[in-house]
Image: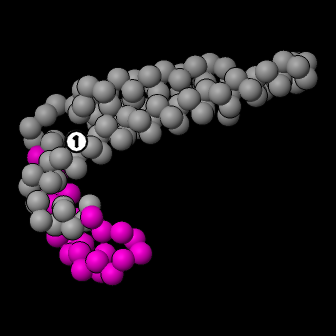
Amino acid sequence: MAASWLLSPAAMAQQALTCTTLQERYRVLADQALQQEIRLLKAVRQRLCPTISLQADEAQPDQSAAETIDFDALISCRHRAEAELQATRAPLYRNRRQLAFYTAAGADLAKQADGLLVRSDQAGCP
């Protein structure tokens, strides 16, 4: 951006549009990658703790059922699921923030998202 004062208004507008497009595409891909990992972790959690997982999955934020969930047990189960994943699988990819991706789809989407961050950096986006 330091050299942006050399750019014409049209060039600056095009750069802003490029940056916005890259950032939006990054957010979509990063979200899709995380959703893949969330599904995997949820499946492991459901296998390890079926009862508490079912309660958590069926609870609605505005229902009193949410009050009956043992959140300590749910958090403990989530930690167990994360530990099992880390112990039994090698990450297929670690993104720029060092988040591990264990699913092929999640790893691929995270790589694509990181590629967009590289392009964003090269375009001089903030």
- Which color mode does the image show? one colour
Which residue appears at 28% of the width and 77% of the height? 65
Where residue 9 appears, x then y in whole percent? 91, 23
Task: Please name the residue that numbered disc 1 is placed on.
Answer: 40
The foreground one among 33 and 9 is 33
Q: Can residue 76 be seen here?
A: no
Q: Is residue 120 left or right of residue 36?
A: right
The residue range painted magenta reads 58-84
Where residue 110 appears, x then y in whole percent? 39, 29
Name the outermost residue toward the right: 9
Which residue appears at 46% of the width and 31% of the height? 29
Which residue appears at 74% of the width and 26% of the height? 17
- Whether 33 is drawn above or below 57: the answer is above
Q: Residues within 10 Å of mark 1 (few under 14, many from 20)?
A: some
Name the quadrant containing residue 18: top right
Which residue appears at 58% of the width and 19% of the height? 119
- Overall secondary structure of the magenta stretch? helix
Name the quadrant containing residue 35: top left
Residue 80 among those drawn in magenta? yes
Query: Residue type at mark 1?
Result: Leu
Helix, strand or loop status at disc 1:
helix
Where residue 80 appears, x then y in whole percent? 13, 55
Where residue 107 appears, x then y in whole percent? 32, 27
The foreground one among 46 and 112 is 46
Question: Where, quadrant-wise, is the N terminus in this rendering?
Answer: top right
- Whether 61 is drawn above or below 96: the answer is below
